[in-house]
Image (tube, grey):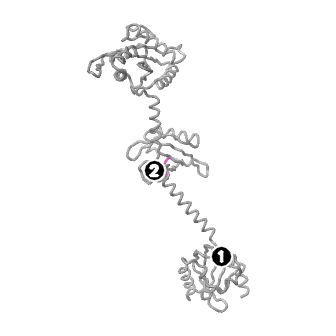
């Protein structure tokens, strides 16, 4: 027996032997686990004193099970119990029990391992997983992962809110299915394959209801253990509201609020880009400068509100005679500019003639119902090989405009040739 006691004493696990529920042996590990002063402090006490009240019934049942005759010598399955130490601390202990004979009488040997630290770690992991799941399910971004063929392997629940689909409806399909224009997806693929990652990459996607939303994508490439490209992982978010605001701010910054045309700044920026392209490729390009005749007299005689209306009607009459590729803008006051790409000075005369005739044909009435008419003067300037910038074209067209006004208005003057 002494050899067995010595063996039990050196075991790393806590060992307690009970007879009729009372502790009759406790090794050093058990003394430490239960925070007792010595084994003598434990012997004679009911083992149930150290079991948490919520685990009392389960503990008693397990001891009774191993004490049954047909279970003698068979340890029961290990199970965790909450144990309250002699100092009142709560610990989680993994306990296994077996019926034995101790000093000639039936007894139960219980071996316990302190799992408190592991349980705390597991609890922290569970809490962390729950927190991550809540974050994952409520995040504004949509997480996604594809294989190397672009097939969606996984997509987060945020896709319900952003695209209106259930995750399983997205998974297994290619990401291209949700792009309104393949060029957007191609641009994204080219950027991420070149750099390995992208941040806030702009694009658009189609919702279940057919509406198109603006998105911002941040993603990186995935590689397998062999270093081969395995797919793409990242997030995307709906930035439609932000983009709409940006578009509206851009519109306000580049649009003349009265006529709806480009303002001076926007016209000159676009015209400069077109001019540079035309000069680089040797393409024809003609600029028209228009001025509403006697506009000050209209304001003085009919008032500024009627003057504004005349400008709006004038702008409309100009616009209806232009192509989609032509650029028109209000440069200030009653002065307008029109840039005609791929148009020679001779061809531009036909456009200018139609514009002036359209303006002259306007049937306007003031607020009292009295009719009045408006006319315009027009100056033309075409691109030249000697031009250094768009400014040279603007100066020639402007000089031609003043020539048309000095000749009596309601006519066309060209810096390139006489207009018959």
State which tag comes first along the sequence, 2 or 1.
Answer: 1
Residue 147, image x and y in percent? 52, 49
Task: Give x and y (percent) for residue 345.
Answer: 43, 14
- Where is residue 373? Give x, y as percent: 31, 16
Prevailing secondary structure class for the magenta stretch in the rendered image: loop
376 shown above or below 241? above
Res. 105 image quadrant: bottom right
The x and y percentages for residue 281 are 51, 21
Query: What residue did someone put label 1 on?
Result: 87
Q: Between residues 89 and 95, which one lies in front from this camera angle?
A: 89
Q: Is residue 17 above or below residue 395?
A: below
Q: Is residue 340 visible?
A: no
In what quadrant of the picture does the N terminus appear?
Answer: bottom right
Residue range (magenta): 149-153
User: In which image quadrant can residue 35 be found?
Assistant: bottom right
From mark 2 to mark 1, how far is it between C-alphas?
Answer: 52 Å
Q: Is residue 144 left or right of residue 409?
A: right
Question: Does 193 sit above or below residue 296?
Answer: below
Query: Is 367 displayed left or right of 334 in the figure?
Result: left
Provide the secondary structure element on which disc 1 rests: loop
In the orientation shown, which residue stands out farthest toward the bottom?
Answer: 104
CA neighbours of label 1 inside 10 A, class few (<14), some (14 to 19), many (20+) = few
Where is the C terminus found, in terms of image quarters? top left
The residue lying toward the viewer, choosing from 44 and 366, is: 366
Q: Would you name the residue on which mark 2 appears?
A: 159
Under circle 2, the secondary element is helix
Query: Is the residue under label 1 in contact with that under label 2 (CB below 8 Å)?
Result: no
Residue at image position (41%, 13%) is 346
User: Can the viewer see residue 403?
Assistant: yes
Disc number lying in front (2 or 1):
1
């Amino acid at each position: 027996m002494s050899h067995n006691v010595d063996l039990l004493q050196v075991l790393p696990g806590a060992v307690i032997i009970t007879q009729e529920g009372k502790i009759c042996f406790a090794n050093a590990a058990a003394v430490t686990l239960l925070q007792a002063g010595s084994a003598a402090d434990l012997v004679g006490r009911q083992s149930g004193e150290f079991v948490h009240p919520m685990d009392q019934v389960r503990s008693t049942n397990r001891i009774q099970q191993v004490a049954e005759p047909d279970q003698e010598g068979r340890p029961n399955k290990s199970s965790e119990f909450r144990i309250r130490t002699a100092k009142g601390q709560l610990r989680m202990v993994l306990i296994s029990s077996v019926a034995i004979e101790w000093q000639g009488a039936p007894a139960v040997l219980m071996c316990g391992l302190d799992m408190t630290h592991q349980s705390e770690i597991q609890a922290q992991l569970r809490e962390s997983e729950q927190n991550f799941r809540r974050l994952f399910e409520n995040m504004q971004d949509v997480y996604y992962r594809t294989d190397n063929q672009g097939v969606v392997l996984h997509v987060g629940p945020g896709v319900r809110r952003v695209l209106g689909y259930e995750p399983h409806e997205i998974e297994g399909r290619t990401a291209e299915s949700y792009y309104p224009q393949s060029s957007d997806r191609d641009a994204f693929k080219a950027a991420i394959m070149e750099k390995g990652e992208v941040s806030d990459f702009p694009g658009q996607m189609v919702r279940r209801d057919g509406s198109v939303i603006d998105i911002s994508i941040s993603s990186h490439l995935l590689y397998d253990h062999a270093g081969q490209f395995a797919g793409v992982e990242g997030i995307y978010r709906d930035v439609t509201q932000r983009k709409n605001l940006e578009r509206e701010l851009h519109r306000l910054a580049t649009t003349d609020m009265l006529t709806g045309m480009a303002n001076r700044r926007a016209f000159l920026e676009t015209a400069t880009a077109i001019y540079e392209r035309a000069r680089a490729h040797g393409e024809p390009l003609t600029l028209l400068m228009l001025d509403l005749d006697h506009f000050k007299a209209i304001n003085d005689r009919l008032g500024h509100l009627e003057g504004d209306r005349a400008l709006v009607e004038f702008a409309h009459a100009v616009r209806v005679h232009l192509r989609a590729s032509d650029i028109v803008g209000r440069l200030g006051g009653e002065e307008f500019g029109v840039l005609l790409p791929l148009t020679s000075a001779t061809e531009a005369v036909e456009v200018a003639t139609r514009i002036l005739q359209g303006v002259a044909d306007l049937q306007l009435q003031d607020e009292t119902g009295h009719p009045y008419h408006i006319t315009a003067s027009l100056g033309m300037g075409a691109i030249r090989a000697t031009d250094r910038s768009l400014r040279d074209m603007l100066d020639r067209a402007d000089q031609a405009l003043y020539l048309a006004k000095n000749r009596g208005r309601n006519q066309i003057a060209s810096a390139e040739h006489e207009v018959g």
